Amino acid sequence: MVFMGTNKHIYLTGFRGTGKTSVGALLARSLRRTVIDLDGVVAANVGKSISEIFQDGGEVAFRDLESTALESVSQTENAVISLGGGAILRAGNRAIIRSTGVCIWLDCDAETIIRRLQQDDASLEQRPALTTLDESQEIRELLKHRYPLYQEAADHRLDTAGQTIEQVADQTMEWLERNASV
Ligand code: S3P
């Protein structure tokens, strides 16, 4: 599949802890594009952390803010946009992603995600519990539930297990150069 990539965003999707934010920063540098972290936009729009948004209004309030933020960033100049792990849950969001960009899915097995999230200091502020399950069960269940949605939203899947951020960014660049003429 060939994309007219130059006038499209590059979206990064995938579960929490798959490296979207770090890979996005590297990609943006290589492509000389602006990088946008959707969670950052949501938090800045309301002046609260993601955890505070969940505490005050629950997940639905967060998803509403996330959809509004996606709609507005999708209309900006072409950028590299790191999505939150659940931004693909709403069909309307998936439609925006598909119509305004090329989407790369950073995938990973549950064990690696569990390990990475435990090591990531941002988890507390940015990643409130999404279910009443314990953390590792939540990750397994949500990965299963979201798998077809990532598949639907994305143009390409990359397995990031055992890879450094730099390796994932290089592989993403290679794929984009071959398939998206960026
Ligand atoms: C979420 C992932 C988070 C953040 C929020 C909800 C999710 O982003 O958007 O906590 O539903 O998976 P990261 O994927 O950047 O951690």
Image: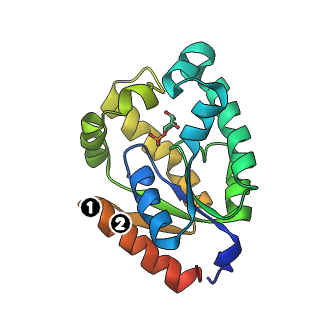
For residue 168, the mark is: 2
Q: Residue at x 39, y 32 (%)?
A: 138
* Location of residue 165 in the rendering, given as x and y in whole percent from the top left corner: 32, 60
Q: Amino acid at mark 2?
A: Val
Q: Residue at x 60, y 33 (%)?
A: 44
Residue 127 seen anywhere in this rendered image of the structure? no
Q: Residue at x 47, y 58 (%)?
A: 24
Residue to which mark 1 is pinned: 164
* Location of residue 96 in the rendering, given as x and y in whole percent from the top left corner: 73, 55
Q: Nearer the viewer, residue 11 or 77?
A: 77
Label 1: state its secondary structure: loop
* Location of residue 41 in the rendering, given as x and y in whole percent from the top left corner: 61, 39
Residue 164 seen anywhere in this rendered image of the structure? yes
Q: Are marks 1 and 2 in contact (CB under 8 Å)?
A: yes
Q: Nearer the viewer, residue 58 or 168?
A: 168
Q: Residues within 10 Å of mark 2 (few under 14, many from 20)?
A: many
Quarter of the C terminus within the rendering: bottom right
